[in-house]
Image: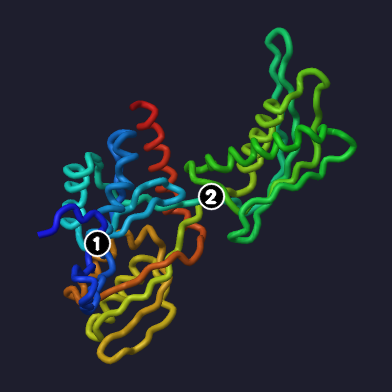
Amino acid sequence: AAAKLKEVASGDTLCEERAPIQFEGLTHFSPLISFALEPKTKADEEKVPQGLHRMMEEDPTIEMHRDPQTREFILSGMGQLHIEVMVEKLKRKYGAEVELKAPKVPYKETIKGAASAQGKYKKQSGGRGQYGDTWLKIEPLPRGKGFEFVDQVVGGAIPRNYIPAVEKGIRETMVEGHLAGYPMVDVRVTLYDGSYHDVDSSDMAFKIAGSMGFKNAIEKAKPVILEPIMHMEITVPDECMGDVIGDLNSRRGKVLGMETNGHSQTIKALVPMAEVLKYAQDLHSMTSGRGGFHLEFARYEELPPHLAEKVIREAKAAAEAHQKA
């Protein structure tokens, strides 16, 4: 028996150094289902990564990452029971309590039109006041271009030292979004005019004015919600092809092509992420466990209006519930 082998992981072989033994490696299966982990306390949040990384060393069939936008811990495994066992182990062995939830879809927001607006912040309440005045034009950029800030102020309408504050106010407002609280992307903002006060103007006043002008312009620039689209490769037996393609169509999927490999078919398709959060379970049912798939991010596309309305309603309801809590 050997004790305290802290560096040993699944798949390692223990043998004498002078007589090495090499076995065939383990076959690693891709995870079939994913859940978001919500730590119950701040202390739990700090324990989760350490515990999960250790468990991943012991069990190669689980995967974990933190979504850069939603900040959720996403745990993937071979089934719901498998995930629940990992969560129980996380609590028992590492002292981290979490709740399982369906992962959030990282929607984004953008605009479809151009618009101009003023953002003016003026406050006087005894003593030194606050004054910042901006005129902005916003317009859409090609998908994936992010954000551009253009300074076209001439004649000293706004002193140069206040320009960075205007941009900062706009950037902070973009993070909050406009329709449903999702980050805004693919927008060019041009600051082209404004005014200032010799005494009352400040970085803070122009930061607020920039934010106000951006919000006013968004309302007139046809804001929309973008959803992530995933590229899928699904391998299924020949006899399951019809069911799988019909199911993809019901998920707003677009089939790109198919490849034959013996008695199986590989379907390539583009499907909205929101439609495939629990796809592993459904594919398992349609193919009696004989189907497999691979997902990777492709691009963002505009969410259809009727679905956007639902996302906006849910976001507002969640915000109201958070305020009451």
Tag count in the figure? 2
Q: Which residue is mark 1?
A: 9
Instruction: Select label 1 or label 2 by which is in front.
Output: 1
Quadrant for the N terminus, please: bottom left
Q: Evaluate if marks 1 and 2 touch, with contact meaning CB atoms under 8 Å apart.
A: no
Q: Quadrant of residue 155?
A: top right
Outermost residue toward the bottom in this view: 262
Q: Is residue 123 above or below residue 12?
A: above
Taking the image as drawn, is residue 114 in sight?
no
- Cα gap from disc 1 to disc 2, whole angstroms: 43 Å
Going from the N terminus, do you reach mark 1 or mark 2 first?
1
Where does residue 169 sit, x and y in percent of width and height?
64, 35
> Residue 144 or 57: which is nearer the viewer?
57
Residue 132: x %, y % from top left: 74, 27
- Residue 156: quadrant of the picture: top right
Q: Amino acid at mark 1?
A: Ala
* Label ID, residue 235: none
Give the residue type at disc 2: Glu
Residue 127 placement: quadrant: top right
Name the residue located 48 percent from the left edge and 41 percent from the top edge.
181
13 w.r.t. 220: above or below: below
Find numbered disc 1 in the image and state the secondary structure of the residue it sits on.
loop
Residue 313 lies left or right of residue 234; in this view the side is: right
Position in image of residue 170 (x %, y %): 64, 39
- State which quarter of the image contains the C terminus: top left
- In percent of width and height, residue 110 lies at 57, 51
Mark 2 residue element: strand
Q: Label 2, on which residue?
A: 109
Classify residue 257 as left or right of residue 122: left
Residue at 31 percent across and 89 percent down: it is 261
